Image (cartoon, coloured by chain):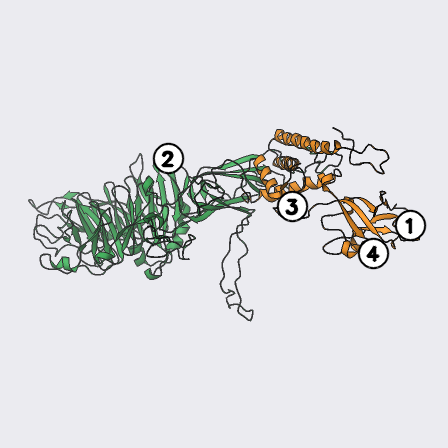
Chain colours: A green, B orange
Amino acid sequence: MSLMISSGGKVLGKRIPLGKEPVIKEATVRNFDGGWNIIDSDLNLDTKYAKILDNVERAPDGSLHMRLGTMLLHEFAGVGLGKLIGAWYFNTFIIVVDNEGLVGAGTADGTVYKIFDDTIAAALPGAPLGWSPCEFVSFAELRGELMIGNGIDKPLLVPENLATRYLQDLGTGTNAFTPVARFVRVHNEFVVWAGDFLLPSTLHISARGVGGTYVGDPIPNDAIKFDIATFVTRGSSEITGIGAYRDRLVVCTPECVLMVKLGGYIDGATSGDPQIHQPTVDDVIENYGSIGHNMILSLGEDMLFTDLVGVPSIQRALITNAISPVRESQLIDPAIQNMLRTLSVSTMQTRCFAVHDKRNYSSLFFIPNSDVESTTTETVCFAYKNIRALKVRAWSRQRDWNWRAGCSTAEGRVVLCQGSRTFVYGSALTDEQYPADLIGYAEAFLDETTFTDNTGWRPIATLEADGTERLFEESGLPISFDWQLPWADLDKRTRTKLSRYIKLDTTGTADFHLEMFVDSMLHEKPLAGETFDDGTIFTDGEFWLNTGMPYDPQLEMHMVGGSKYGLGLEEFEDWFGGSRITSDERLFAWPSKFNIFKMRLHGKSRGPLRIISMSLFYHTGNIRR
Amino acid sequence: MEYANSTQLIQDVVLELSQFPGSGSQLYAEDNILAKLRSVFNSLCGEAWWPHLLRWSSHELDGNTGKVTLATQFPTTLRDFADIRAVHIDTSQKPIARLPSDFNPFGLNGTTPLFVEPLPSEEDTTIGGKYLLRVWPQQSVGTLRVRARHVNPNAFLDAEVIVPFDRFTLVMGACMLYAASDGNNPVEVTAFQARYTDALTKCRIEISNMPTELDTRAPSGVTEWQEWPV
């Protein structure tokens, strides 16, 4: 190509040395079905996977969206409850238990009640004491009544009218034989208790269809105790949790999963004796187990649970009907293992929990980042999106949360507990797409930053600086998010590529930074930090304030979601007069030279943000740089 | 000619290339576009003695080295000896001749300049201005009137400084180079080139059509007119 800059004989750039194919190409990423993947090398990974996927997840509509925030639902401190350790949705109420053994109930409009404490217990027949301080509870429902066990005290029964009392044998009105156990599950007309400190491998199975009648209570009574120890073929026989999968009770130990069938009867010893309930163990799955009862999710066709390696599930084979295990978390197992390795068995059993988010098709597994509760600053959530109809199985990691317990409601809302409060997690419904965390409870600095541990100011302001009333929804903390793609070579590994433009399709209003790394240069060299005044360092070679390895992008651009107006159309203090709006179809120059490249999109903002696609315009060059 | 500053020129190019507009929006295109604008501008400056770039300036000879005095040295708007159109002695209509390269000037005597030559760069090291030239004999004294092409050195450094060349021509030239670098659509490059050539032709026509002095008794005619291969 001959370009005549000067027409008078002098020629500038008569031959433009392109050094590249004179055809601009386009590569688009729009499939996010793979989710988070850390097990595979990101030098050889499809772009449907993400090397980092923090607070971003594959949405049901196929896009990648910033996770939703949470809004304050209940404050139980006013009725005397402290740190909530368990929650369950029951009869339109959120039933919670605190670490002092008090039980509360909250309605959808935020009204809270205390439904059990020493005073309420003292008013019951026999004037029993209330519950002791505890760190763990589990819940199960039978005949429209809720049973709660903590493994320390006799279980409680919460009827529809919330007049809480102790679970008892209805014939005698006593709970003398009611088991004291941590785990409770209702299955096939039986209430099953496990986690008895005195009988750790024993299932306490109630009389059929009756929640309060157990071995020792008078007839009619077909309750039994069933020791599973002899069926455990690997590891400890201590029961760590019980779940249910279709017609099987699933009993988990640390390294085995037992399929127990309830409801089988054998004749009594002599003619005329009542039949005896005889559970059977018809399958034992080795090398799979559960770290805790509250990490088990029964989801109809699946049962998900968590062991020391990751998150397996059990499923029924299509043809043979046999139950087989599948390790669902294979792509992120190292991340789960890394979290669990610092936790004691006690912490895993008491403070790890899982919630199924029906509205978002996600199973959420929460693991604290410290074995000591007082030093726990984050409960990392491993979220598993499983949309069977679309064959989507994608993991992501939800960060900057510190929940202690949670549950899901009949309508599919997820309620999470922190301190004496419950918060409701956002959903796809228009008025529930919460753009920030802890709305109604905490707020950020004026510049939308938070403290370094991602906490904010409390209590929230109710008035603006000018004295006008401040909307409740304007509080909350912005959400950090980070999406990092694998390295990509645009199908020509050894050829130089020259990027020209970048194009993103996004919706939402969050702002974010788009970065591109080239040629395996992801981080700067580690910052050494400071020496002592005399120039020496610590004997282990470390410096003061070693700040790690900051990212080293070749290109970086600040952008906002496609639903913003910008360019003078926004209100003041809200991108007035500027910003790069990704819905604009004009080109964003994105010049770089590389053999392989990696994209990263991150930020800390109020949502929503939805990424539909990302396109790169580029030339393919030759093999020489 | 319509002039514009570099910010306006960049935004013109951004719009022509259908890039996302807004000052400061194009983190990586704006520097590139600016470089292309500067390249086009520098090339065009040397294309002709554009009247709007020519200035008269006065300088005193130091009577010793053939250079002008420190106080009257050339301003930074005059970048190079090649930008000097003519050097006159005070009120003389006759420009001083360029020193022939095969002429030994050391035999020259007197205090009236006979020849002028560019000053070697190693002898022209002052900050804030330049001597640029030397006259022979070096003992020459008096005032020099210099006609030269002046350009604000901040034209591409300060976003608010006007770039003294036709806005449309510069924009089309930069677009042509950018589109060629994109390499996407040869037709687009050709279109930009055609628009650029047209704009440049109009600029040339402006100086070719300017009134000239027809009185042959005049000591010097206008010399800016020229043949133009249209």
Label 3 vs 4, first from the N-terminus: 4
Gap in angstroms between the C-alphas marked 3 and 1: 41 Å
Give the label on residue A390, or none.
2
Provide the residue designation for mark 4.
B62
Gap in angstroms between the C-alphas marked 2 and 4: 88 Å
Q: Is residue A94 left or right of residue A536?
A: left
Provide the residue designation for mark 1.
B104
Q: What's the chain of the residue with tag 4?
A: B
Q: What's the chain of the residue with tag 1?
A: B
Counting other residues with Cα less than 10 Å from the Cα at mark 4, is it few (<14), some (14-19), or many (20 or more)? Answer: some
Q: Do labels 1 and 4 share a chain?
A: yes
Foreground mark, 3 or 4, reads 4
- Residue contact between numbered discs 3 and 4, judged by CB atoms under 8 Å: no
Provide the residue designation for mark 3.
B156
Tell me if residue A218 can be seen.
yes
Label 1 vs 4, first from the N-terminus: 4
Q: Do labels 2 and 4 share a chain?
A: no
Q: What's the chain of the residue with tag 2?
A: A
Amino acid tagged 4: Asp
Counting other residues with Cα less than 10 Å from the Cα at mark 1, is it few (<14), some (14-19), or many (20 or more)? Answer: few
Counting other residues with Cα less than 10 Å from the Cα at mark 3, is it few (<14), some (14-19), or many (20 or more)? Answer: some
